[in-house]
Each structure stands twice: as C-alpha cells, then as structure tokens.
Amino acid sequence: MRIGLLGGTFDPPHVAHMAVAEAAFRQLRLDAVWLVPAGSPWQKEGTVVTPAQDRWGMTLAAVEGIPYMEGDDREVVRPGPTYTFDTVSGLPDHEVTLILGADAASRIASWHRSAELQEMVSIAVAPRPGVDPYTVAEAVITRVKWLDVPQLDISGTDLRERALAGRSLRFLVPEGVWRYIETRGLYR
C-alpha cells in the first residue's frame, strides 16, 4: 500500500495540514494519507503542548468522513520521545512517502537517524512562506517531490494565541476540530 505520512504536533490540526494532505494524496497518487500526531514531540521540549489524547482526538475529528485519510495513533501510544524513524520502521509492508512542510524538511538533518530514515522513504515537501527551497535541498539527501499547494500562512502557535485572545478558530481548522476544541474548552 502506498501511504503518505503527515506527522506533526497537531496542536491543533488546521486547514493547511488538510490542504497539504489532500495535495499529496492527489498529486502522488497515494492509496491513503495517515495523519500521525506526535505523542511526545522531542522538538517541543520545554514548551507547553496540549495533552496527546486531545491532539489525537482532534486528529480523528480532522479526518472524519474523508475515506482516504486516517489518523494513526502509534506515536501517541508509544512511550518516550517520538521519532519518525521508529514510526516508519514499523511499516515494512508499506511504500511510505513522508509529507513535510518546507520548514520541517529544512531541519530533517537534525532528526533521529535522519540518513537512515531518508533512505527508507520518499519525501514530498509543501512550500512554506519564508522558507527558501535551497535550505530544503541542502538538508534532504534524497530527491524531493515538491507539492503544488497554496502556501497558507497558518501555524498551531498562531491559532492557539488567537484562541487565547478570544478569537474564533472556525474555518481555520476543520469543522470537527473546531467542535472538539469548543466542547473540550481547549486553548482558553
């Protein structure tokens, strides 16, 4: 099975994540795209992160009703820091494309077992505002497939700050995610 893995903190999952997942599915002719929330994101050490179970719940809400997208909780249930290398190693029967924003791709060399990981997957990259494609080319040691997707300047940090200021996240996150946030009282 040809799957795209879109990992992230998903705090919260937003419309830019969904646009990138959709673009990867269509342009790369994948069988499915899995959204994989990080259980304990090592890149976020020292910052406050919404509990993994809520990020998992929002991920499920984001993909609800989309037959070719699903949430995958393997990083949420795995104890300790979550590394993409471990996740991909657990998928030996799949042809995996790692779906990254250009910001993440430009830092891939710092990832746990990065060179080995890059040998195991194809890499698809979505352009991001303010990220020079040259920095991605320097960091990624394999061929990059660039996705044709609008550069939506949306980040989880900005959305959390917006919510804390009392502004609505509706239409910036999938409808199910917005309902989950409202019901659970997140980001207040």
Image (cartoon, rainbow, N blue to C red):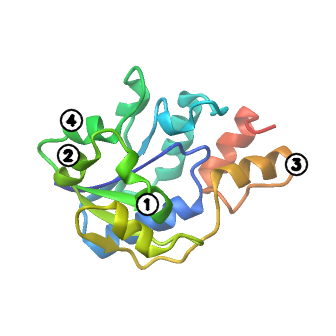
User: How many residues crowd around disc 4 within 10 Å: few (fewer than 14), some, or many (20 or more)?
Assistant: few
Find numbered disc 1 in the image and state the secondary structure of the residue it sits on. Answer: loop
Position of residue 127 measured from the top left corner of the image (x, y, whole percent): 48, 72
The kind of residue on which mark 1 rests is Ser
- In the rendered structure, find residue 106 and report the number of the disc placed on it: 1
Q: Which of marks 2 and 1 is nearer the N terminus?
A: 1
Find numbered disc 4 in the image and state the secondary structure of the residue it sits on. Answer: loop
Q: Residue furthest left?
A: 93
User: How many residues crowd around disc 2 within 10 Å: few (fewer than 14), some, or many (20 or more)?
Assistant: few
Q: Which residue is the site of mark 4?
A: 90
Q: Which of marks 4 and 1 is nearer the N terminus?
A: 4
| Screen quadrant of the N terminus | bottom left
The kind of residue on which mark 2 rests is Glu
Q: Earlier in the sequence, mark 2 or mark 3?
A: 2
Q: Which residue is the site of mark 3?
A: 165
Distance in Å between CA atoms under marks 2 and 3: 43 Å
The kind of residue on which mark 4 rests is Gly
Does residue 10 appear in this view? yes
Distance in Å between CA atoms under marks 3 and 4: 41 Å
Q: Quadrant of residue 86?
A: top left
Judging depth in this view, the residue of 169 and 132 nearest the camera is 132
Distance in Å between CA atoms under marks 2 and 1: 17 Å
| Screen quadrant of the C terminus | top right
Q: Earlier in the sequence, mark 4 or mark 2?
A: 4
Q: What residue is rendered at 29% in x and 70% in y?
A: 144
Q: Which of marks 1 and 3 is nearer the N terminus?
A: 1
